[in-house]
Image (tube, rainbow, N blue to C red):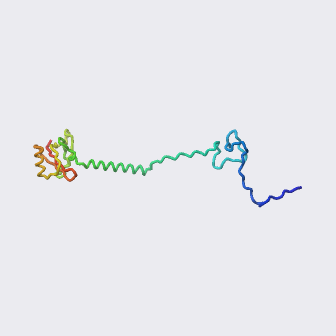
Amino acid sequence: MTTQPPPQGNPFAQNPPQAPQQPHGQNPYAQGQPGFPQQAGQPGQPGFPQQGAPYAPVPPQPARRKLSFKTIKNIVIAVVVVGVAVGGYIASRDDADTAAVGDCMHRGSSSDTDPDLEVVDCGDAKAQYVVLAKIKGSFSALTAESKCSEAAKDFQYSYTESGSGSDFLLCLKDK
């Protein structure tokens, strides 16, 4: 009887695993496809399902960035602030600035220092005065009366505005 000699080297060492070899002529990527039998001892790659193509899976498209609630809230607040600012500017404009000869006016206040004149349609029941003349410049009460007498003989009231960037005088009469 013949005995085999012991293996050379460390008898307790384990053999390192070797990569499986494909026989020549076979497609190494055809594993798991019908018509190409899976070779014994060659499982598919761990963590990936067996595929019939050598291509990596297509990564998903990045999702479109959605606007957050905070961003939408800030946009709405900005639009409201701009709207209030524009509305306040329009409301604060004195209609006497925009009045022209022939326009009808309504007195919104009983104050003689700030009558709050506004332009209204002459057919409106609120129409109280008609503009006879509009003269640019700064005038005192005395000079306003004399200027209106020159520009509109039948005027009854004078209204002066100064200090707002455009000084002017309106000569008015009852409608």
Residue 36: x and y in percent read: 70, 40
Quadrant occupied by the N terminus: bottom right
The quarter of the picture where the C terminus appears is top left
Query: Residue 59: where, in percent of width, then height?
Result: 56, 46
- Compared with 6, 156 (above or below) is above
Q: Residue at x 74, y 56 (%)?
A: 15
The spot of residue 152 in percent (x, y) is 12, 43
Q: Between 64 and 134, which is closer to the camera in this rendering?
A: 134
How many numbered marks, from 0 up?
A: 0
Q: In the depicted view, which residue is nearer to us: 116 or 165?
A: 165
Position of 6 with respect to 96 (left or right) is: right
- Position of 105 with respect to 15 (left or right) is left
Location of residue 14 with respect to 123 vertically, above or below = below
The residue drawn where x is 82% and y is 59% is 6
View extreme (front): residue: 24
Residue at (57% x, 45% y) in the render: 58
In the image, 93 versus 72, the foreground residue is 93
